[in-house]
């Protein structure tokens, strides 16, 4: 029995006693009147009991680019941040997850290394249309595609006609298509200005996101399938999603902690640790993203944990055109988002909905991301009022690079349980398949 004077249950904070039998939650009852238990743990008064977070956007990169990240380091970082389930993106590993054979390679490498539960996305690339159904049957949670150069040659992007065929196939098999939505024709590389962030931002305008999202929505209307737009940075696209839902399209959208935390006006010259694609935009755009989250127009918040080596991040001595784009943040997502939410008068229950329940629901993991009878006993002891300064040396991802270095954040994860067991030094995570319970 885990007793907490503050716990997030059914979308609200309440006092609760959470019973665990084996790996599952067996009861959720009143704090002061729990059923008998063999062992009882009572949280401290400054702690809140949360469900384990579900991060559906993590680039593990193993095998092939394990010097960037790997299953052992990425899942240790996830657990330290209160994340108990991750879905691994089909790139930047070599091979990419674009065939069943490649999926098996990745699963074999991951087996026995993972500290949290791990599922896998498949990839939709030119030439693998016939691989989508077998990958779906093999248990991937859906398919990721790019509408512009992905940055790695082994994962090419889809042209509009190829997107139409791929979305037709995912609709046919009932799979979710997730899309990196930027229109490469609207990028302006001539705007790049070396170490100056303003040039990088100008090179990837909001219009590129909006045009690509429009293409996805058009195809979704034709196919009557299911789609999800990853890492939205351009708040101007929010009305497009609202309008699509009003006519019944099955569309969802995520944003990321870095878009909710940083702003273009405060990114200094050469600060390539903050380079990501699409880019971090202006403060007014950030506030519009927060407003869209609060209104329910943005469905979920996930990390887009996309690490690389320090040398790649600093390539070109701070030149935004040359440095690798990606932010490693799976360990810091919860405190980063909670810090911003608290400052705007939003509740911890909102954060749990965005970062645990909604991601789990979108990928049909009904036994994850919630404190409820029958759910996995994935739980987090979280001290929301304790503050800390981010020390890169204390982070568990492989390379000591962080956009959050030196930043003051609120919220400390004191302990994470995976299926009823505290996460420790021995990897206890499992590999997940779509549809399993």
Image (spheres, grey):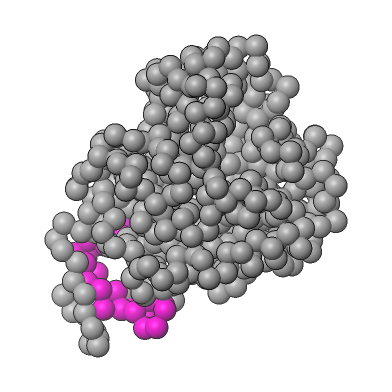
Quarter of the figure with residue 267: top left
Q: Is residue 23 magenta?
A: yes
Residue at 18 percent of width and 71 percent of height: 42
Image quarter where the C terminus lies is bottom right
Tell me where residue 275 appears, x and y as whole percent: 50, 28
Residue 7 falls left or right of residue 165? left
Residue 103 falls left or right of residue 294? right
Residue 37 falls left or right of residue 332? left
Where are the magenta residues, as a range? 1-27
Quarter of the figure with residue 180: top right
Magenta segment's dominant SS is strand
Q: Say whether residue 293 is visible.
A: no
Q: Is residue 326 magenta?
A: no
Is 43 placed above or below 24 here? Answer: above
Residue at 60 percent of width and 17 percent of height: 203
Total labels drawn? 0
Image quarter where the N terminus lies is bottom left
Q: Say whether residue 231 is visible.
A: yes
Is 94 placed above or below 217 here? Answer: below
Residue 295 falls left or right of residue 162? left
Tell me where residue 92 appears, x and y as whole percent: 63, 46
Is 328 placed above or below 5 here? Answer: above
Residue at 24 percent of width and 88 percent of height: 38
Tell me where residue 151 appears, x and y as whole percent: 66, 34
Observer-nearest residue: 118 or 352? 118
Residue at 70 percent of width and 65 percent of height: 104
Tell me where residue 126 appears, x and y as whole percent: 82, 43
């Amino acid at each position: 029995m885990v007793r907490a004077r503050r716990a997030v249950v059914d979308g609200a904070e309440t006092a609760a006693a959470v019973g665990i039998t084996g790996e599952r939650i067996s009861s959720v009852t009143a704090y002061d009147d729990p059923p008998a238990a063999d062992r009882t743990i009572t949280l401290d008064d400054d702690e809140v009991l949360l469900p384990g977070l579900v991060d559906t956007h993590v680039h593990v990169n193993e095998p092939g680019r394990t010097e960037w990240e790997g299953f052992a380091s990425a899942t240790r970082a996830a657990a330290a941040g209160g994340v108990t389930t991750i879905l691994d993106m089909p790139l930047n590993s070599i091979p990419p997850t674009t065939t069943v054979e490649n999926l098996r390679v990745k699963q074999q490498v991951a087996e026995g290394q993972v500290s949290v539960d791990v599922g896998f996305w498949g990839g939709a690339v030119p030439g693998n249309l016939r691989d989508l159904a077998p990958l779906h049957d093999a248990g991937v949670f859906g398919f990721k595609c790019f509408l512009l150069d992905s940055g790695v040659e082994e994962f090419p992007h889809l042209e509009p006609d190829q997107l139409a065929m791929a979305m037709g196939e995912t609709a046919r098999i009932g799979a979710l298509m997730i899309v990196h939505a930027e229109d490469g024709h609207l990028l302006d590389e001539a705007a790049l200005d070396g170490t100056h962030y303003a040039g990088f931002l100008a090179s990837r305008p909001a219009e590129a996101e909006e045009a690509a999202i429009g293409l996805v929505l058009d195809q979704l209307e034709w196919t009557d399938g299911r789609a999800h737009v990853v890492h939205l940075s351009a708040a101007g696209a929010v009305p497009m999603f609202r309008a699509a839902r009003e006519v019944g399209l099955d569309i969802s959208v995520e944003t990321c902690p870095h878009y909710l935390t940083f702003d273009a006006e405060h990114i200094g010259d050469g600060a390539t640790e903050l380079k990501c694609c699409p880019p971090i935009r202006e403060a007014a755009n950030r506030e519009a993203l927060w407003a869209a989250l609060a209104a329910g127009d943005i469905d979920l918040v996930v990390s887009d944990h996309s690490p690389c080596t320090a040398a790649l991040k600093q390539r070109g001595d701070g030149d935004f055109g040359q440095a690798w784009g990606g932010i490693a943040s799976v360990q810091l997502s919860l405190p980063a988002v909670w810090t911003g939410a608290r400052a705007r008068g939003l509740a911890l229950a909102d954060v749990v909905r965005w970062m645990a329940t909604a991601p789990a629901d979108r990928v049909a993991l009904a036994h994850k991301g919630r404190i409820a009878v029958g759910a996995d006993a994935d739980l987090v002891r979280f001290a929301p009022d304790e503050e800390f300064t981010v020390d890169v040396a204390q982070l568990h991802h492989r390379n000591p690079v962080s956009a959050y270095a030196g930043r003051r954040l609120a919220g400390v994860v004191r302990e994470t349980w995976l299926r009823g067991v505290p996460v420790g030094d021995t990897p206890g995570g499992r590999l997940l398949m779509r549809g399993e319970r």
